[in-house]
Each structure stands twice: as C-alpha cells, then as structure tokens.
Amino acid sequence: MFKSLLTAMALAGALTAAHAADAAKPVTPATPATPSVAPAAPALPASMPGAKAPMTKSTDRAAAHKAKRAACQKQAGDRKGAEHKAFMKDCMGRKPA
C-alpha cells in the first residue's frame, strides 16, 4: 500500500515537472495561411455617386430570400404558432410565378 502511494506521488511529481517545462517554452505563432482565393475587387469610395459594393451571387441569393420571406410574412397576417410555421414553410417552398 505504501509502495503504491509512493509510486503515485512520484508519478504526479514527474508529470507536474514535465508540464512546467512545457509552460516555460515560448509559444511561437503558426505561420499565417495564405488565402487561396483572389482578393475581392476594391469598393468604390462612398463619395462617388452610385457607389455600392459589388454584388456577388451569394448576396443576390440572400437578398432574394429576404424579400421572399418579407412577402410571405406579410401574407401570413395574424397567424400564430404551428399555423404560422406551416404557412411560412409552404410559402417559402413555392417557386416564383
């Protein structure tokens, strides 16, 4: 019993010393990854008339989704709970005419 207790204490001391040695090492930052995509086109200055960030396919889709959600929300009216959820699911799933 005493021998196993002594062994456990020695093991704990060794692990603590190893951890302390790791903590003393300076941490070097990893090399930053180089971007795999080309940088976006620079935005026009805000002072120029009609200056907007260039639209991408994903932002076009997001804008269309947002507009469709707003239209469905307006059509939903005073529906609440499960009825509202079912209506929105059906409305958002419909293809535009």
Image (cartoon, rainbow, N blue to C red):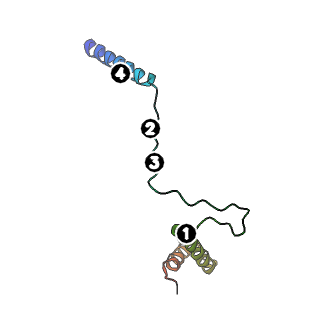
Q: Earlier in the sequence, mark 4 or mark 3?
A: 4
Mark 2 or 3, closer to the camera: 3
Q: Which mark is residue 34?
A: 3
Report which residue position mark 1 lands on: 62
Q: CA distance from mark 1 to mark 4?
A: 53 Å
Q: Nearer the viewer, residue 22 or 16?
A: 22
Residue 21 as seen in the image, left or right of residue 83: left
Mark 1 or 4, closer to the camera: 1
Query: Is there any visible trace of residue 49 in the rendered image?
Result: yes
Q: Quadrant of residue 79?
A: bottom right
Q: Residues within 10 Å of mark 2 (few under 14, many from 20)?
A: few
Report how many numbered discs are placed on residues in the image.
4
Q: CA distance from mark 4 to mark 3?
A: 38 Å
Q: Residues within 10 Å of mark 3 (few under 14, many from 20)?
A: few
- Label 4 close to label 3 by CB (< 8 Å): no
Residue 27 as seen in the image, left or right of residue 69: left
Report which residue position mark 4 lands on: 15
Q: Residue furthest bottom?
A: 97
Mark 1 or 2, closer to the camera: 2
SS label for mark 2: loop
Q: Residues within 10 Å of mark 4 (few under 14, many from 20)?
A: few
Q: CA distance from mark 1 to mark 2?
A: 35 Å
Image point 37% across, 21% down: which residue? 18
Image point 33% across, 16% down: which residue? 9
